Image: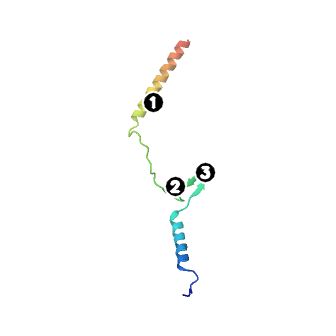
Amino acid sequence: MIHNTLFSKTVVLSIVGMSVSAGLCGCQTQMGGQTLPSAYYLRDDVQFFPAGPEMQLPNQRQALEEYRASSENLDADLNEIR
């Protein structure tokens, strides 16, 4: 059997397989110490939304209660000093 081609079928198939696998892998880059998955990371959609209350009223109420408690403590401390 005489081979007239430059490359055998196994060599061509392996080269094609490696180029296809390299094309499907994608590439990563590092910028500012971060490993970025692709060049389009700024255009990606947000995939995680942290759970939290729908309304901000509970947070505001808690903040006001903490403020009142701290101001009452400060007033009590100032009255003790006088």
The reply, left or right, for residue 45 in relation to residue 4 is left
Marks 3,1: beta carbons within 8 A? no
The residue under the point 52% across, 56% down is 41
Q: Position of residue 16 (x, y in %)?
A: 53, 73
Rounded to the nearest angstrom, the CA distance separating label 3 from label 1 is 37 Å
Name the residue carrying label 3.
33
Q: In this view, does 12 lie to the left or right of 47?
A: right
Residue 77 in percent (x, y) is at: 53, 16
Looking at the image, residue 80 lies above or below residue 35: above
Number of the front mark, 2 or 3: 3
Q: In the structure shown, which secondary structural element does the residue marked by tag 1 occupy?
A: helix
Mark 2: which amino acid? Leu
Residue 81 position within the rendered picture, expressed as x and y whole percent measured from the top left: 56, 13
The residue pinned by badge 2 equals: 42
Q: Residue 71 placed where, x, y %?
A: 49, 22
| Labels 3 and 1: the sequence-earlier one | 3
| Upstream in sequence: badge 2 or badge 3 | 3
Label annotation for residue 25: none
Q: Which residue lies furthest to the right in this view?
A: 32
Residue located 58% across and 83% down the image: 6
- Kind of residue at badge 3: Gly
Q: What residue type is labelled 1?
A: Ala
